[in-house]
Amino acid sequence: MNLVRELVETKGITVLIVEHDVSVVFSLADIVTVMHQGQTIAEEPPDEIRKNPTVVEVYLGTSEFSKGLS
């Protein structure tokens, strides 16, 4: 993890990480893109993703998105 952060900070490169462990994503990402069923449902900084109602609903299974109805 430190290597990824170091590369971003010292080389100024962009890194694409595909990861389902949210703690890893939140610790590394400046911007998080959340996808559901092939569609982007949110693209925000980690603090905003944590409180995004659509993301919370989809991943807690309390919305129509989670039932495949959208």
Image: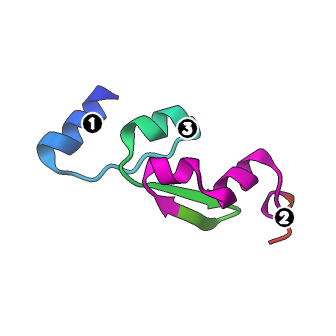
Task: Tell me the CA gap for discs 2 and 1.
Answer: 36 Å
Q: Is-magenta flag for residue 28?
A: no
The residue tagged 3 is: 22
Sequence-first disc among 2 and 3:
3
Amino acid at dot 1: Arg
Q: Is residue 13 left or right of 54 when viewed as pictured?
A: left
Residue 7 lies left or right of residue 41; in this view the side is: left
Q: Give the overall secondary structure of the magenta segment.
A: helix
Q: Label 2 to label 3, Cα distance in Å?
A: 22 Å
Residue wearing tag 2: 64
Write the start and end of the magenta stretch as one range: 43-66
Tag in front: 2 or 1:
2
Task: State the quadrant of the N terminus.
Answer: top left
Question: What label does residue 5 carry, if any?
Answer: 1
Which secondary structure, mark 2? Answer: loop
Question: Residue at horizontal 76%, vertical 46%?
Answer: 60
Residue drawn at point x = 27 percent, y = 36 percent:
5
